[in-house]
Image (tube, rainbow, N blue to C red):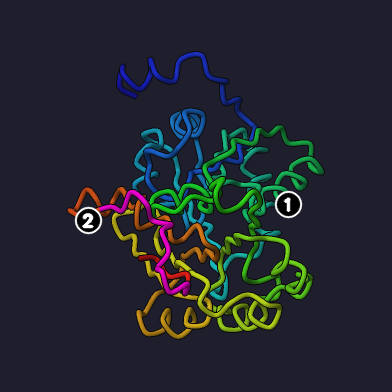
Amino acid sequence: MDDARRNLLAGLPVFEPGSVWLVGAGPGDPGLMTLLAASALAQADHVVYDALVDPDVLTYARSGAVIEYAGKRGGKPSPKQRDISLRLVELARAGKRVCRLKGGDPLLFGRGGEEALTLVAHNIAFRIVPGVTAGVGGLAYAGIPSTHRDINHAVTFLTGHDQTGLTPSSIDWASLAKSSPVIVMYMAIKHLETIADALLCAGRGAEEPVAIVCDATTSRQRVLETSLGRAAADCAAAGLTPPALVVLGEVVRLRAGLDWLGALCGRALDPDPLRREADGTGRTA
């Protein structure tokens, strides 16, 4: 570890042998890792990382640390969750400092709670290191705020599939459509048509703005602006693939004024992106 990094991480908790840290790596850009996450990587003997962890984040691991892939991706062959959890137990019992590295935040659709409870059952010491979740950090890199006081005072985060890989049956789509002005969906591309139909049947408008953000915060980031009625077809036509976020709500219109990454490449930003056309269609002028 170089002197600058050592000084930056000085005074942070010591990673004890035989323990596991469940660490959120953030949505992709290594700069969005917390200092505690960087400290975990700098101290760990063994890093067990998920598919959504950007490769650049792994360059912060200590020289000599073992880097083990345990990627889980919805709809694709993946290690079983129980096997991953027991692997953490095995490594900790061998006296290793185990960094379980997850994309985003370990406790928001990250199964960190399940893994932590397995550690508790086997008397393994652990620490949870929160991370910047993609539903906030990823949208910020797309120039879309999760909340804006002129638009919404509530936001809902949901997953687009459950343990079976299907659209979550436990979600009350009708109540959600009526109660949440902004909905941020993780892992929703596969079932986007079904989800959009459910929200439309529950009363959301076909022209309500939607943004789909792929590979958020990385150099591969792509953003598609569309509408709820066209979202599934436009997503398929654009060839967008996971990992992706889908956000529904009027906050998407703010991207015309807040796309700071686009501005770095020459996009002219609108200081009044919520201005409506006089014809009352609700489209951004």
Examine the structure image and report whether residue 124 is included in the region drawn in magenta: no
| Element under disc 1 | helix
Q: For the magenta stretch, what is the residue range?
A: 269-281
The residue located at (60%, 28%) in the rendering is 17
What residue is rendered at 45% in x and 52% in y?
Answer: 138
Q: Which mark is residue 251?
A: none
Majority secondary structure of magenta residues = loop
Figure quadrant of the C terminus: bottom left
Residue on which the image places disc 1:
114
Q: Residues within 10 Å of mark 1 (few under 14, many from 20)?
A: few
CA separation in Å, label 2 and label 1: 44 Å
Q: Which residue is mark 2?
A: 267
Q: Are marks 2 and 1 in contact (CB under 8 Å)?
A: no
Horizontal relation, residue 227 to residue 162: left or right = left
What's the amino acid at mark 1?
Glu
Pinpoint residue 174: horizontal percent, then vertical percent: 75, 74
Residue appearing at x 47%, y 82% in the figure:
230
Q: Quadrant of residue 234?
A: bottom left
Where residue 235 appears, as percent x and y from the top left, is 42, 79
Lower sequence index among marks 2 and 1: 1
Between 244 and 272, which is closer to the camera in this rendering? 272
